[in-house]
Amino acid sequence: MGEENKVTLHGMWLSPYVKRVELALKVKGIPFEYIEEDLSNKSPLLLKYNPIHKKVPVLVHNEEPVNESLVILEYIDETWKNGPRLLPEDPYERSKVRFWAAYIQQVMECMLKIFTAEDQEKACEEFYEKLDVLEDGMKKMFPWGSPKIEVGNIGLLDILILVAFGACKAQEEVFGVKFLDPQKAPLIHSWVNTLLELAVLKETVPPRDKVVSFLRAFKERSASAQAQ
Amino acid sequence: MISEDKNHHLKRKNKSSTQLIEMAEVKLLGVGGSSYSRRVEWALKIKGVKYEFTEEDLQSKSPLLLESNPVHKKIPVLIHNCKAICESMVILEYIDETFEGPSILPQDPYERAIARFWAKFLDGKCLEAVGKALWSKFGEEEEKSKQEAYEVLKIVDNELKDKKFIGGDNIGFVDVAANYIPFWLEIVEEATGVVLVTSEKFPHLCAWRDEYLNCSEVKENLPDRDTMLGFFKAKVLAATVAK
């Protein structure tokens, strides 16, 4: 069975969407080959596998491509049923996870606006509003205080939360915005820090100085694009 | 072909009284004119699930709606055994996983991934491009947005080349996700005067649209066309005045 299961991930080292897939594969213990794509010069394979969006991540399983990070995560969960399930068994609990997965997407889009927007103040306001709602939603989801995090039990929301907020210190350094304040979002803050301590997750986090220099360059490019 | 005898499904379900009670506990908070709301209704019809529909007044949302969807305060909301499920595409997956009856999503994980990909494309990039183009007379760059809409519609048209429905022989997850295109799009075209879909440009899309509107789950469950046209004409008027 091992030989039949050739898994390749086309990605970009800093893409949070690629990280999601990387984490899911690691958590499930699925061996895979990683191909770093140069997004300014996309490979013919990438364009063949994702002709509509031409984006990463693309998961290729036995030469069949799967696109869109959340679609890939559900595919992984449904295909490799051994080990921890990324989504709960119960349909209602699954619907809650999917609902919040979609909401986290909105939060991440707000963060991107902060990185690129001219009106950073307005973008921050929007972000903090959404973060409040997310914190509140997670409090309701885990009324006993925080999600139960175990190495053998990492799920979809753990992955999404880690990817959304895992780089916030580097982001704070470059953009001067405190994305995750332990006073304002105590549950999410503690959740992210607990996740960052787990070896299997920690090893996928890129080195901070590499992230910082990439973000600085990105910031400069955005600023000069706006100045034009 | 989805069973023409809807009653057959109901009879099967009536065998168990627990299932009867379960079905009676299905409520849908929606708006008849909303494509998102109708997605959920058609999914319930595919499964043969009986439900109680409440038409929400979006200018004066019910306490139940606000309580059931505190995050977005939007319809549709499915309430099953007192539990609220929000977001139409999330609801569709819930319906497929919870109730017996014909499958809305395929069984095979890879085919499910393909279906979810298409649903996301249609609900996202496609709908956005189409909506922007339809209302482009009141926005910017009318020609550019029309070109973008043609591009996404061509992708859908190509996908339908050898298929009756995007889901294959029967309407499924992706077709339900794409429901704006076969019904609402054409009404908005009439209201705004922006025509995107012609059978010359998109022959397979048009064939699909005709099949779609003829499905039993859909045909008897559409909002009144004249009412919808009136609604969109009023929107056009408001946008004209604003401009």
Image (cartoon, coloured by chain):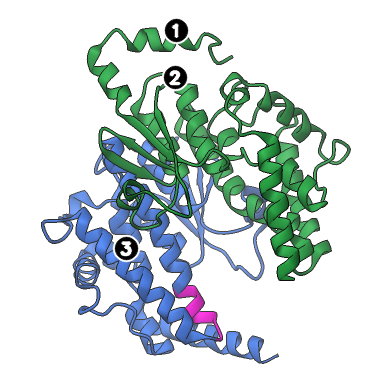
Dot 2 alpha-carbon crowd within 10 angstroms: few under 14, some 14 to 19, many 20 or more: many
Q: Amino acid at mark 3?
A: Ile
- On the picture, is B77 further left or further right than A116? left
Q: CA distance from mark 1 to mark 3?
A: 45 Å
Residue B187 vs A166, above or below: the answer is above
- Of all residues shown, which one is farthest toward the right? B200
Q: Residue at x 34, y 78 (%)?
A: A168
Q: Secondary structure at mark 2?
A: loop
Mark 3 = which residue?
Answer: A161
Image quadrant for the N terminus of chain A? top left
| Place of residue A46 in the rendered image (x, y in percent of width and height, measured from the top left) | 62, 55
Q: Are marks 1 and 2 in contact (CB under 8 Å)?
A: yes
Tell me the residue at 18%/57% (across/down).
A147
Instruction: Report whether B84 appears left or right of A17.
Output: left
Q: Colour of chain B?
A: green
Chain letter belonging to callout 3: A
Chain A: give its colour.
blue
Identify residue for label 2.
B48
Q: Nearer the viewer, mark 2 or mark 3?
A: 2
Q: Please tell me whether mark 3 sits on a helix, a strand or a loop.
A: helix
Q: Chain of mark 1?
A: B
Residue to which mark 1 is pinned = B8
Q: Position of residue A117 (x, y in %)?
A: 54, 82
How far apart in space, not on screen, are marks 2 and 3 (Cα)?
37 Å
> Magenta segment range?
A111-118
For the residue carrying disc 3, how many other residues have a C-alpha within 10 Å: few (<14), some (14-19), or many (20+)?
Answer: some
**Residue B152 horizontal/vertical position (percent):** 72, 49
Between A27 and A112, the residue placed more toward the observer is A112
Seen at 42% across and 85% down, the residue is A212
Q: Which residue type does callout 2 highlight?
A: Gly
Report whether residue A5 is seen.
Answer: no
Label 1's element? Answer: helix
